[in-house]
């Protein structure tokens, strides 16, 4: 929740989460003590009374995309936090709100959940815009797509790089609702995985090295390293010998499940099953694929280093997410990985924040 906006600066007034270690990481890095606990109307009302008013409300409520035949999607207990977010909009009445979610949000429950959220916001007097955005087009070295729904009381929100001819107007019954299947269309992918990580030392599986290998090689690395003495958490998980041998057969952009790769791989090394992006090696000269919560597990994600036979290190994952090296994740290795994989890239948040400034009216 943004307390105030001065010039081009947005000041965070209150942060709320129910994951303890994420709250501790937030406090450690951003200097603001978040409220950690169950999110409900009573809490939001108390926060608004004690700390409001708020100009901006931003949240990423998780939800379930299951069918609810014959029921309102917002009545489903599995969408409880989406309802609580909408309640927060109603209680706080910000000038602008942003709801972030997975790319499939618009089609969940045959589109019913999306329509009910849009209608709810429109009934509160908001002009609603929605888009699936690609983070690599705003300076993030990662091809990460996220759904964003933005409601404004003032000017209609314009996504960075958007041309008005690019958006599709939906059914008139949905009032101000229009949806961009792809935003930032005027942008260009500026940074690759190699651009983001080439100053970090090489690692073997299971190794850790928290020293820079060379000076910054580009502007992105200068951004990552500003104020940092070393790349904390540059550590790679260990792999079994047979798995390391399997990795050696996988070229950039290919998977151990690809028939042409398997034809050159000894039969005892060939994985028998996997997801579409399992056992896949990243392309170094392109932005990384989506950094998921499983980005250190090649059997579950596209996360094999392009030039080294191992999964990505925690710091490499954080850099692909555009976190600076001064940002330190707290908790166990697993908790750090989950925090990194679940995060919204800071540079994407910056781009959306700058776009908000054009939609705020005093």
Image: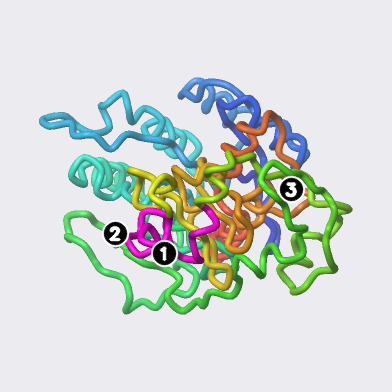
Mark closer to the chain start, 1 or 3:
1
Q: Which residues are magenta?
A: 247-265
Q: Which mark is residue 176?
A: 2
Considering the image in quadrants, where does the C terminus appear?
bottom right
Q: Which residue is mark 1?
A: 156
Task: Tell me which residue sits at (80%, 48%) in the image.
Answer: 209
Crowding near the residue tagged with mark 1, few <14, some 14–19, many ≥20 C-alpha atoms within 10 Å? some
Q: Nearer the viewer, residue 237 or 150?
A: 237
Label tally? 3
Mark closer to the chain start, 3 or 2:
2
Q: Which residue is mark 3?
A: 234
Residues tagged 1 and 2 counted as in contact (Cβ below 8 A): yes
Q: Nearer the viewer, residue 254 or 104?
A: 254
SS at mark 3 in the image = loop
Between label 1 and label 3, give the one nearer the viewer: 3
Residue 123: image location, x then y, percent: 30, 44
Task: Tell me which residue sits at (42%, 54%) in the image.
Answer: 256
Q: How is the image coloured?
A: rainbow
Q: Is residue 248 above or below residue 240?
A: below
SS at mark 2 in the image = loop
**Residue 259 covered by magenta stretch:** yes
């Amino acid at each position: 929740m943004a307390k105030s906006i001065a010039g081009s600066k947005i000041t965070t007034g209150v942060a709320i989460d129910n994951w303890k270690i994420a709250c501790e990481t937030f406090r450690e890095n951003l200097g603001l003590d978040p409220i950690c606990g169950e999110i409900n109307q009573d809490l939001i009302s108390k926060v608004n009374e004690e700390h409001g008013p708020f100009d901006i409300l931003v949240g990423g409520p998780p939800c379930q995309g299951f069918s609810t035949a014959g029921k309102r999607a917002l009545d489903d207990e599995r969408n409880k936090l989406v309802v609580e977010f909408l309640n927060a909009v109603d209680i706080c009445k910000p000038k602008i709100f942003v709801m972030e979610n997975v790319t499939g949000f618009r089609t969940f429950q045959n589109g019913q959940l999306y329509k009910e959220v849009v209608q709810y916001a429109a009934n509160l007097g908001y002009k609603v815009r929605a888009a699936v955005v690609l983070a690599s087009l705003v300076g993030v070295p990662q091809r990460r797509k996220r759904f964003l729904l933005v409601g404004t009381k003032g000017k209609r929100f314009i996504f960075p790089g958007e041309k008005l001819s690019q958006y599709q107007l939906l059914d008139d019954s949905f009032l101000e609702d229009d949806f961009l299947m792809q935003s930032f269309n005027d942008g260009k992918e500026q940074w690759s995985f190699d651009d983001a990580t080439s100053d970090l030392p090489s690692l073997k599986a299971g190794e850790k090295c928290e020293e820079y290998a060379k000076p910054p090689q580009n502007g992105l690395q200068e951004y990552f390293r500003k104020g940092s003495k070393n790349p904390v958490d540059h550590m790679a998980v260990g792999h079994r010998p047979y798995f390391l041998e399997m990795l050696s057969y996988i070229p950039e952009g290919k998977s151990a499940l690809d028939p042409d790769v398997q034809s050159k791989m000894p039969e005892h090394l060939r994985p028998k099953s996997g997801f579409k992006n399992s056992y896949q090696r990243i392309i170094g000269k392109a932005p990384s694929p989506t950094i998921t919560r499983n980005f250190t597990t090649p059997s579950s994600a596209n996360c094999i280093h392009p030039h080294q036979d191992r999964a990505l290190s925690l710091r490499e994952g954080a850099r692909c997410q555009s976190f600076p090296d001064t940002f330190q994740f707290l908790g166990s290795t697993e908790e750090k990985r989950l925090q990194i994989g679940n995060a919204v890239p800071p540079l994407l948040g910056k781009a959306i924040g700058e776009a908000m400034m054009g939609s705020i009216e005093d």
